[in-house]
Amino acid sequence: MSAPSVPDTQPGGRRVAFVDLVRAHAELRAQIDEAVARVITRGRFVLGEELEAFESEFASYVGSRHCVGVANGTEALVLALGAAGVAAGDEVVVPTNTCSPTWLAVSALGAVPVGVEPDPDTYTMDPSRLRAALGARTAAVVPVHLYGLAADMDAIRAAVEDSASGSGTPRLVEDAAQAHGTRYRSRRAGSLGDAAAWSFYPTKNLGALGDGGAVTTDDEDLARRVRSLRNYGWGEADPYVSRTRGMNSRLDEIQAAILRVKLGRLEEWNARRAAIADAYISRISNPALRLPREPAWARSSWHLFVLRSPWRDQLREHMDRLGVATLVHYPVPPADQPAYADDSPSEGSELARQLGSEVLSVPLHPHLSAAEVDQVVDALNSFEPVRGDR
């Protein structure tokens, strides 16, 4: 099946969509149809063979011993933290520069999110600032592998281990929602902490055709607790008896079957993303823009290509006029959002706030054509800011 055309939006040009899921799924349509039909034929739609197979295959891909499929990425983080022992009143250290679900998962357990500012070069959690945030009430630390780039996990782990006290060492739970295929040194994201939470939202590098999530871990007891918590707190030996206060959070068979198909193409699609990112970095030469860079110790999966400019709003208008869709990830730090107005200090998110006013994500997905890449590059290079107007 051929890829659908992109509609014209202006004379002589076509609009470049930020993401194009129609093209992505057209490439796999026959395999996806076969996978869905397989589930329908079996007649088992929850906690069946497809989920078991996907859990095994994704755990192997990540490099973890266990994978537990759940309903979505936010609940994956809630369940991972809860299974790791986080309880009401505990403190959980989280980045100030992240999407709000990272904080909301902590709050769902009655725990208190404590924000740490990002490293100014990678925009992920700054390990040096982390040390000052760790205290006697810290139960866990949640680094976010942001935009597809891994946080500096060795430095973060060193800070966490140095903070150990008589009450134990805080648990290290990765937020890997944007890190499918991300590498940190010789390992993949999702295998670097005590547990990791994943999202399979449709726009992720590995996305379902609906919501989905998972927890990966090497800890057999933690995996067992997540399996129980996702299914009403029931035990394997005594279903219908809630040993703990669990929930209904299960990755269904159809989504698991679709994810198995797409997992087989993840490395190829990530390689396409990397090639586009390389083209952007080598060809964008506008001094008004700051481009992302990979540190020596990480290889991004390029979930997003996020550049930075003091004239971000002008730039976004310029790109729209030239037919290139953009998005802002993320304009408002969680601590500044109304949900946290009553219990978050106004200070402590200054760099995240600055990033929120300057970052802009441009199209980067594995189905961009060469002509579309040219259009994005040309639009960025032609941007001339009005320097007195931000």
Image (spheres, rainbow, N blue to C red):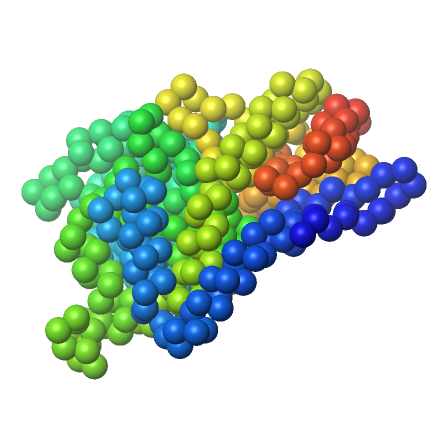
User: Which residue occupies 28% across, 40% down?
Assistant: 63
Instruction: Give the residue at x 20% y 73%.
Output: 234
Left or right: 81 in relation to 36: left
The one of 354 and 213 positioned closer to us in this rendering: 213
At a point 16% along the width and 52% down the height, the residue shown is 220
Report which quarter residue 239 is drawn in. bottom left
Q: At which x and y percent is residue 310?
A: 66, 29
Residue 346 visible at all: no
Q: Residue furthest bottom?
A: 240
Residue at screen point 27% across, 28% down: 154
Q: Where, quadrant-wise, is the C terminus in this rendering?
A: top right
Q: Is residue 207 above or below residue 359?
A: below
Instruction: Answer with left or right where residue 317 lies relative to residue 367.
Output: right
Horizontal placement of 325 versus 47: left or right? right
Q: Quadrant of residue 80?
A: bottom left
Residue 187 visible in the displayed image: yes
From the viewer's side, name the closer residue of 64 and 153. 64
Residue 151 versus residue 263 in the image, above or below: above
- Given the current orientation, which residue lies at the most extreme left position? 166
Residue 24, percent from left and from top: 60, 49
Does residue 224 appear to the left or right of 305 in the view shown? left
